[in-house]
Image (spheres, grey):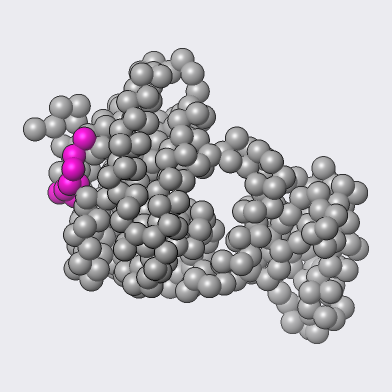
Amino acid sequence: MPELNRERLEGYLSSIYKTQVRIGSISEIGKEGVSGLKGFGYGIPYVISFSVDSEVKRVVLETMSPNSFGHDHFSDRAQGLLWDHSAFNRLPRHVRSIDAGAFTQDGQIISVGEAEEFFILTEFAEGAGYDQDLKRIASTGKMGSMDEDRAKTLAGYLVSIHRVKMDAPHLYTRRIRDLIGHGECIMGLIDNYPPGHSFITSNLLQRIEKGCVAWRWKIKGLGHRLCQVHGDFHPWNILFREGTDYTVLDRARGEWGEPADDVGTMVINYIFFSLQRYGRLEGDFERLYSTFWKTYMDAAGDVEMLKVIQPFLAWRGLVIANPLWYPALSPEVRKGLFNFIENVLANEEFRPEKANEYLDINPP
């Protein structure tokens, strides 16, 4: 693990900005500033504040940690970070990427030919994660004055990016194949479930995996649906400032894909937070869920999505139900999520208004 010192970092930033840069502070996001980056850790984002010709700027320097979700190899992580740099700046309202670079084993910042690990440098975006809004509602049981407007805004954003289409049916087929087999997606999630859980057995996970494979054969030929996507549109990747002013972060897994991916990723989180408070979809979470669906469907008119979204909801359900990432969930919440996954996969047409039926063991 390299040591990245202030002098090397100033030299690198000076080469990017074509003038002498002076660093004011370096800090891990969420922690107090430090004077240097001794023991620099892969996967930890650092905010760097510096001056350029008397103007103060802030950037975020972040690497990708090795893990078993398709990032095992150096080349996996290089691919992801290089793609981030190439794609972030082509999506409206996304935080901007400034550069992509790499470290050598001794901490030098160099061209990719001698790279030990890659990193990405982005602008720093102000704001609070949308998850904070949902946590507040889960705590108080009440929406604030802007919550419904924010749900409408996010749905409208997806409508706007999904209108950008791409004629490449083979790319759609790959995206559906990756949904099933990629290390970050369904099979990767299943392979990283801890063994020995009280009810999450290998038989349960096999049933879900087989159900998802069956869905691949139903939808992989729908290349006409290929469009611009975010690819990881969950509340932690959206920063709100005042009102409905926001920035999105960390799009993933390709510029083009299935619009149900983005929609499913957001709507399941309204269910997730509501389950933790009420044990079902209820109250203001149900209102936000319905508002998001109605806003999106009224504008997009994509009724075909209701016959495509099932494996995407299953994937995201596997994410939020995983004890590895959410160890403190009650057994009832976790069981509700698995009921939802299995019941959704069993229905040829998803009905948003039946969300609570899908959470039951035996929906009518």
- Taking 150 as reference, is 68 above or below it? above
Left or right: 301 as drawn, with respect to 185: left
Q: Residue at x 53, y 39 (%)?
A: 183
For the N terminus, the image quarter is: top right
Q: Residue 26, located in which quarter of the rendered image? A: bottom right
What is the magenta segment's predominant secondary structure? loop
Using the rendered image of the protein, determine whether residue 94 is visible from the camera's viewpoint: yes
Identity of the residue drawn at 62% across and 53% down: 80
Q: Image height check: is 194 above or below 351?
A: above
Front one among 131 and 342: 342
Horizontally, is 304 left or right of 79 in the view? left
- Residue 241 located within the stretch drawn in magenta: no
Residue 229 point in image, percent of width and height: 42, 62
| Residue that protrudes farthest toward the left in the picture | 364
Q: Residue at x 34, y 72 (%)?
A: 163
Tell me where residue 226 appears, x and y as whole percent.
Answer: 37, 62
| Residue 349 highlighted magenta (yes or no) | yes
- The answer to whether residue 256 is above or below residue 98 is above
Count numbered badges in the picture.
0
- Judge by depth and name the residue closer to the eye, 92 or 131: 92
Residue stretch in magenta = 346-353
354 lies left or right of 161: left
**Quadrant containing the C terminus in the rendered view:** top left
Where residue 248 appears, x then y in whole percent? 48, 64
Q: Residue at x 89, y 62 (%)?
A: 8
